[in-house]
Amino acid sequence: MAKKAENTSKDITRPPIVTVMGHVDHGKTSILDAIRKTNIQGGEYGGITQHIGAYQIIHANKKITFIDTPGHAAFTQMRSRGGKAADIVVLVVAADEGVKPQTKEAISHAKVAGAPIIVAINKMDKAGADPQKVKQGLARESVLTEDWGGDVISVNVSAKTGEGLGDLLDAILVLAEVINIAGDKNGELEAVIIESKVDRKRGVVVSGIIRNGTLSLGDEVVASGLDAKIKSIGDDKGERLKSATLSTPVEILGFKDTPHVGDLIVKKGSDLEELSIDEGREEIIGKDAKKTISLVLKTDTQGTLEAVKGSLADLITSSIEATYALKFVHTATGDISESDVMLASSTDGVVIGFNVRLPSSVSDYADSQRVVIRVYKTIYELIDDAKDLLEGTASKEEAKIKGRAQIQKTFKLPSGDVIAGCKVLAGAVKEGSRISLYDKDPADLTEEDVPIYTGVIKKIKHKKDDVSMAGKDTECGILLKPKFEGLLKGLWVEVDRL
């Protein structure tokens, strides 16, 4: 046993941590409850499990930990903040209803998280159950089950009768073995927070799962930049523990303030301590305002991030006069990702990028989620546009508009090309965007109206500079390809695809 303790974390596996996702009323909670009750009735655990956000069972003499609380937004938050919440996602789809909007959303969350999926086709006891129809719908979302030529395990189950639950647990253990989930109880402590709240009697109560190392009574730890000394450790069965290790769900006391869901708990003074500080933690500027705008901010460097945040804070505290508050739900460096879009969607927020890339796949996903994304190259454009956002221009209706501009005048170049001098009225126009020209306001279009021209934006000029994009209220010159001789003042430019 002594030799085993000396092994690296790569040589030691730990029990899988599983989260269950899917469309509302498809049976996520019913499956979790059925698994928990079956395990208790099987005599492997005595007593009633406590609600601490997760629980652990034993199946085939192996442990499996289930996270039983997070909805899609919480799952995204855990991932975006750097705490890997779950190793495996069980996607629940009702056999009589098939793929629904939240099923698609859950698939997106799992893909962004990089977590492998097991499909649980639930409600097989109901009339009209059609697992093949479910698999067909999943295939449209690029989730191919094994019998459809893919590698995704699917299991037919019924939370009501218990059918297939054992097979589902078998599948989890098989997949866990394949992906080789590593952990070392003697390694550095890493526990991911899944719940954090203030209890009137007990103070700050934090629930988490140990992903690596061991947590013991009296340990001095850090999470979200907050220090704590562990005063109490409890498990999902209400038992008091002296220590807890790999994949164990725990409820701990000792924090004076509530750390953030998704952040890591690590030992104070360890090499991992910097990971416990969430650079993108939620921050509100102008808390007494009547309306709050949620914002996901991504920039190219940490220095730029602080500068942009400072400029936006100045805007709030000066010109807006406390009418609006700004909530930074996530701030970080790097290109805009689907995870950023998910966070913005779950908070009815917008995404702002500065000197970062917006991949076309992310832009398309944002369109499907009706999330506004704006990317800027200069701080002046960003601040001008941010003021409009705070004054209410980022409405859900505007979110449907990718980009809209109107031609104010035209210029003919010596080469023969014609530049359309435009004012952007909504969204943004971007180099390479596909556009259509209309002779009437696109807001008034009917199904019978057809564009007078379709093409691509070849180049955008702002004053004397070439720019890649122009946002709302910006005046710019647009060169289209192929060439269109009929450019006239008053025509409308509508972006079809960014």
Image (spheres, rainbow, N blue to C red):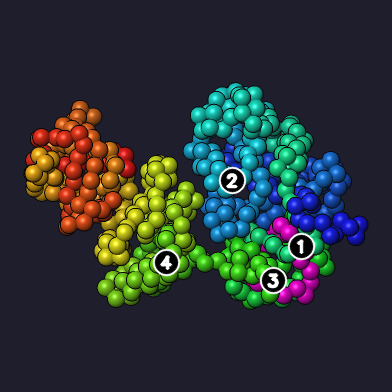
- Magenta span: predominant SS is strand
Horizontal side of residue 430 vs 77, given as left or right: left
Q: Amino acid at mark 4?
A: Leu
Residue tagged 3? 270
What number is the disc on residue 305?
A: 4
Q: Which mark is nearer the camera, 2 or 3? A: 3
N-terminal-most mark, 1 or 2: 2
Residue 382, placed above or below residue 470: below
Q: Earlier in the sequence, mark 1 or mark 3?
A: 1
Q: CA distance from mark 4 to mark 2?
A: 26 Å
Residues at discs 4 and 3 in contact (Cβ within 8 Å) = no
Q: Dividing the image into 4 quarters, which one contains the C terminus?
A: top left
Q: Earlier in the sequence, mark 2 or mark 3?
A: 2
The image quarter in which residue 27 lies = top right
Residue bearing mark 2 = 114
Mark 1 and mark 2 residues within 8 Å of each other at the beta carbon: no
Label 4 – label 1 distance at C-alpha: 34 Å
Q: Is residue 133 visible?
A: yes
Q: Position of residue 336 (x, y in %)?
A: 43, 53
Tell me which numbered mark, 4 or 3, is placed earlier along the sequence: 3
**In the displayed structure, would residue 35 be above or below residue 69?**
above
The residues bearing labels 4 and 3 have C-alpha atoms spaced at a distance of 27 Å
Image: 198 above or below 85 = below
Secondary structure found at label 4? helix
